[in-house]
Image (cartoon, grey):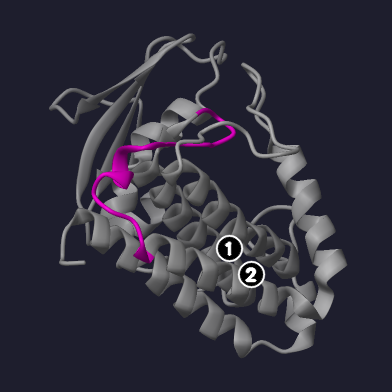
Amino acid sequence: MGTNPMSELIELVNSEASRLGEFLSQLDEASWSRDSACEGWKVGDVLGHLASGGATWANSITRAINGDAGPPEGGAFLQPGERGSSTIAQAAIAINQEMGTKLLETFSEGYDRLRQVMAGLTAEDWDKPCFHRRGPMPVRDYVGVRLQELTVHGWDIRSGLDETAELSKEPLADLVGRVPRWLTNAFRPGLDLPAPTRYRFQVTSPVPVAEDILVNRDSYQVEPSGSGQADVTFGCDTGNYI
C-alpha cells in the first residue's frame, strides 16, 4: 500500500493505538481508578470504551467489505433525537468492571485485529457503506471516527493523570476536517440565545482555523471569519480547539 490518503489515515490510527498502548503499559494498578478528563469516567472506564471499540470497528469494517452495512446482532441505529451517550457510559463502566486486569490485553488484541483488517482494505473498499449507530457511513469516515476516539479519549486518560497533557499533534489536521460532523451531531435546536449569536474561532497552530459559527435558535451556519464583530471569540491552539 503506497502513501495516499487511505494509507495515511490508517497509519495514524495504528500509531495512536500503539502510542496509547505503550503509555497504558507503564501505569500502575492505582492509576486505573483515577478520574479521567471525561466527566464521570475513571481511567479504566475510558480504556474499557476504547478496548471494545477496536474489535467492534474490525468487525463492522469486515462486514462492510462484504456488503453488509446493517446493524450487527444485538445492535441498532439510534432513533431521531436519541444521543446514546448514557448507554455508552454504562457499557464502558461495565466493561471495566468485567475485564479488570485484562483490559490492556483486550485493548491490544482488539487493535491488532483492527490493524490486520485495515491492512487488507483496497481503494474500492474505502467508499463502501459501513454500519454506525448514527447511520451508515463510508469506510473512510468510519476509520476516521476511530482516529477521533483514540486521540480524544487518549487525551482524556493522560490528562486525568497529568494536567499538562496535550492532544497528539499528528492527527490534528485530520480531526479539524471532522469538526463539521461533530457540529451536526452536537447541535440542538431551541437554544435560549439572543438570535443570531456569532461565535468566532481564531485558532493558531499547528493547524490554523479562522471560522465563525452563526447560531440561531433552530439552526447554525459556518462562515469564514470576517471583519465584523463577534459576540464571543475563542483564541486557542488546534489541540484546545478540538
Q: Residue at x 40, y 64 (%)?
A: 13
Q: Is residue 128 magenta?
A: yes
Q: Which of 129 and 181 is in front in this view?
A: 129
Q: In this view, does 57 lie above or below 64?
A: below
Q: State the residue in front, 142 or 174.
A: 142
Kindly tell me whether residue 228 is visible in this rendering.
yes
Determine the main secondary structure of the stretch shown in magenta.
loop
Is disc 1 in contact with disc 2, using a CB cutoff of under 8 Å?
yes
Q: Which residue is drawn at 80% across and 65% down?
A: 96
Q: Residue at x 66, y 19 (%)?
A: 79
Query: Helix, strand or loop at disc 1?
Result: helix
Q: Indicate left or right for 104 with 13 as reference.
A: right
Total labels drawn: 2
Q: Quarter of the image containing the N terminus?
A: bottom left
Residue 237 visible in the shown view: no
Question: Which SS class for mark 2?
Answer: helix
**Span highlighted in magenta in the image:** 119-135
- Position in image of residue 78 (x %, y %): 64, 26
**Nearer-the-camera pick, 65 or 217:** 65
Three-letter code, disc 1? Asp
Q: Name the residue under label 1.
A: 156
Is 1 positioned to the left or the right of 165 in the image?
Answer: left
Quarter occupied by residue 25: bottom right
Residue 204 image point, x, y percent? 22, 54
Assess whether residue 192 is covered by the magenta stretch.
Answer: no
